[in-house]
Amino acid sequence: MYLIKEEKRTLIQFLLLYLGSSFVLFAVIAYLFYQNESKAFYDKTRNIMQINASLLSSKIIHAHMSGNPFSLEKVVNLYQGKIGFYDKENKVITSSIRDSIDFEEKVYMDKEKMILVDNSTFGHLGVKNIVIEKEGVRAHMRDLQYKILSYLFLIYLFLAIIGYFLAKLFIRPIQMKRIQLDNFIKDSTHELNTPITALMLSINAPKLESQKNLERIKLSATRVSEIHKDLTYLMLENPKEILVEELYLNKILKEELSYLSLLAEKKKVAIDLEEKDKIYFKIDKESFVRLVHNLVNNAIKYNKVNGRIKISMKEGKLIIEDTGIGIPKKDQVAIYERFYRASNQVGGFGLGLNIVHKVCQVYDIDISFKSKVEVGTTFILIF
């Protein structure tokens, strides 16, 4: 339960970090975009108004200088928008503008409107100022704001959805490890409970010193010992204490098989050892024992009743072949992962092949296998 809460907390933290940083980034982009667009719109509107005013000013000056008639009222009536002409005392000559004008400002905003005051006529035809009014400027800016905010919301919503699935993808390996760890705890508890229970029953049995009872005690004690050795080797091993020396592997293999024979006999599995060659290899003894024990132990556990195991030592190779249940193809890629189990048919908690793989990596032992469901599995180690 604690690990599940931690996963959810990690997921929420990842989402908050992702969404928070995304929001800040896109908010800054949206603000800069609005600033740029609003400035561009203001400049464009002002330039158009200034060009119109300059054109009218040049026409007024030309009409005055050439003595040609020029109707200011006609301009006001035909102009698309609002325009006004004012004399030197800033009184209206003719205008469609109804608001008061601030003649001290060249360009300014008045509520929803932009107003431009141009005095480039220099009093020709009695006109000192041309005033042009552009309506709807602020309304256009508000529309631009709404559009940017809408796009920002949609993009942020899209990013939130993507972020959620990315977070789920990010947290999935943690969830898988948590599930594997949960299974390991359950399986190891069960795996230890079986031999411990057998030991307790054997100790309290009426015929404590009977041959059958002593064999049961030995088998249970050996199992507890092997579990402890596997855990110690995998998680508590200190490299400084390893003694690497050239070992006669055939001899160590035989010693280990003598311990495993009880388990094989219990399951009615026959073990055949074929020694064609002597193999010497530089390795620490405990690592080789862990390697052999886990491979042969798996061959026994996942074998069929009355099955066989053939172990060969030849040409620098150790070959362990069984007639067991086999490993499905979909599971073959992951069999060396810690806590991974391809089958729940028998006991175990997914450490054996991980230890084997680790030993092979440390001592540069080439390991390969072939397996077929309901036919068996063969492991080949080249020293």
Image (cartoon, grey):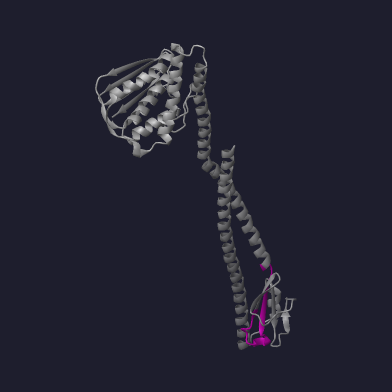
Q: Position of residue 239 (x, y in %)?
A: 35, 38
Q: Position of residue 286 (x, y in %)?
A: 35, 30
Residue lying furthest right in this view?
98
> Which residue is depicted at the point 52% across and 12% down?
206
Q: In the rendered picture of this protein, how many numbered marks are placed on residues?
A: 0
In the rendered image, residue 129 lying in the magenta stretch gets the answer yes
Question: Position of 321 compared to 8: left or right?
Answer: left
Q: Nearer the viewer, residue 194 or 322?
A: 194
Question: Position of 363 compared to 165: left or right?
Answer: left
In the rendered image, residue 312 lying in the magenta stretch gets the answer no
Q: Position of residue 89 (x, y in %)?
A: 71, 88
Seen in the picture, residue 344 relative to 245 is either above or below; the reply is above
Extent of the magenta region: 117-137
> Which residue is depicted at the point 34% across and 32% down?
360
Q: Nearer the viewer, residue 362 or 252?
A: 252
Screen quadrant of the C terminus: top left
Screen quadrant of the N terminus: top right
Q: Position of residue 288 (x, y in %)?
A: 33, 29
Q: Is residue 46 visible?
A: yes
Q: Is residue 325 visible?
A: no
Q: Quadrant of residue 242?
A: top left
Seen in the picture, residue 10 relative to 251 is either above or below; the reply is below
Question: Position of 294 compared to 128: left or right?
Answer: left
Q: Nearer the viewer, residue 352 or 195?
A: 195
Q: Quadrant of residue 298?
A: top left
